[in-house]
Amino acid sequence: MLQVAVPNKGALSEDAVALLKESGYRCSRYGRELVVYDNANDINFVFLRPRDIAVYVGNGIIELGISGRDLVMDSEAKVRELMALGFGGSRFCYAAPKDKNFTINDFNGKRIATSYPRIVRQDFARRGFKGSIVQLDGAVEISVQLGVADCIADVVESGRTLVEAGLCIVGEPILVSEAVLIGREGIEELPEVKKMLARLHGILVARKYAVIEYDVEKKVLDEVCKITPGIEAPTISPLANPEWVAVKAMIKRNEANDIMDRLYSLGARGIIVSEVKSCRI
């Protein structure tokens, strides 16, 4: 039986459960239970703190886990990133008081407040910096104002809390994070893991694409096929009117409106865009 660790709360948990459900797995909780058994797929979904998941996977207690890349790296657990999952995006950045005009080199020798001490130590070692790391569990932004630290290293989403604390980002992000599926070395060779990877990949690809269908005159078929080339080639079907054909192809979802405009201007009609639930490409 495969065991998969899932975040137990927050947006990371909600998005992970939604992705797994779309992939055909039963992993919804009715209350605060820690384990949900998916009988059809013979999988135990174990709900754990996101920060602890990499530790369980790295120690071989659980085969797979979903957590944030930043948390996985900070754990220093012996795991592999098997797949990026496309949600929970954030940046891990250095920040300092806006009025200090810090550059990244000014962090050398300073007190750095963070909830991710190992990532900061790794980055400092890479840069040849020395400094004092102040480990905090939360509310890192206020540490400078309270005199606990000179600057911080923290996860940044919108950046609003930094601005409210009088801080600004310094330098490029140390790490760009998102939710990832992790496992031990070689675990991806197991048949049930291969199946999960294929299912998840199918959902993630489907979220990027849509299917477009339209009718068009044959005389502009070459032009419209350049706009909607599909994966291998568009599907072209005859219509009752011999001068017209029906065309069907996959397109990138974020380009759908522009593609519809271009097709319509070339005379295409009956243009319909449909959602793709899952796929194998």
Image (cartoon, grey):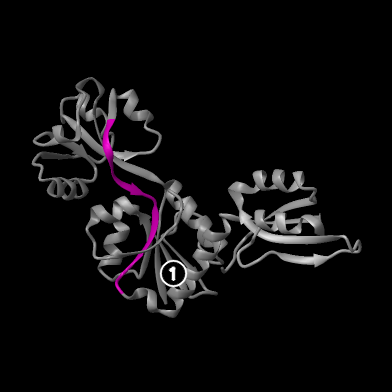
Residue drawn 34% across the image and 23% down it: 164
Residue beneath disc 1: 44
Residue 135 within the segment the image draws in magenta? no
Q: Where is residue 145 in the image (x, y as percent from the top left)?
A: 21, 23
Q: Is the magenta stretch mostly helix, strand or loop?
A: strand
- Residue 123 placed where, x, y %? 18, 47
Work out which quarter of the rendered image holds the N terminus and state it: bottom left
In the figure, residue 211 lies in which quadrant? bottom right
What stretch of residues is rendered in magenta? 169-185
Point 26% across, 66% down: residue: 58
**In the image shown, does 241 or 277 lie closer to the viewer?**
241
Left or right relative to 162: residue 202 = right
Q: How crowded is mark 1: few (under 14 residues within 10 Å), some or many (20 or more)?
A: many
| Quadrant in which residue 63 is drawn | bottom left
| Of the pair 53 and 84, the residue shown nearer to us | 84
Q: What residue type is labelled 1?
A: Asn
Is any part of residue 3 visible from this angle? Answer: yes
The correct choice, above or below, for 265 with respect to 3 in the image is above
Percent of width and height locating residue 254: 59, 47
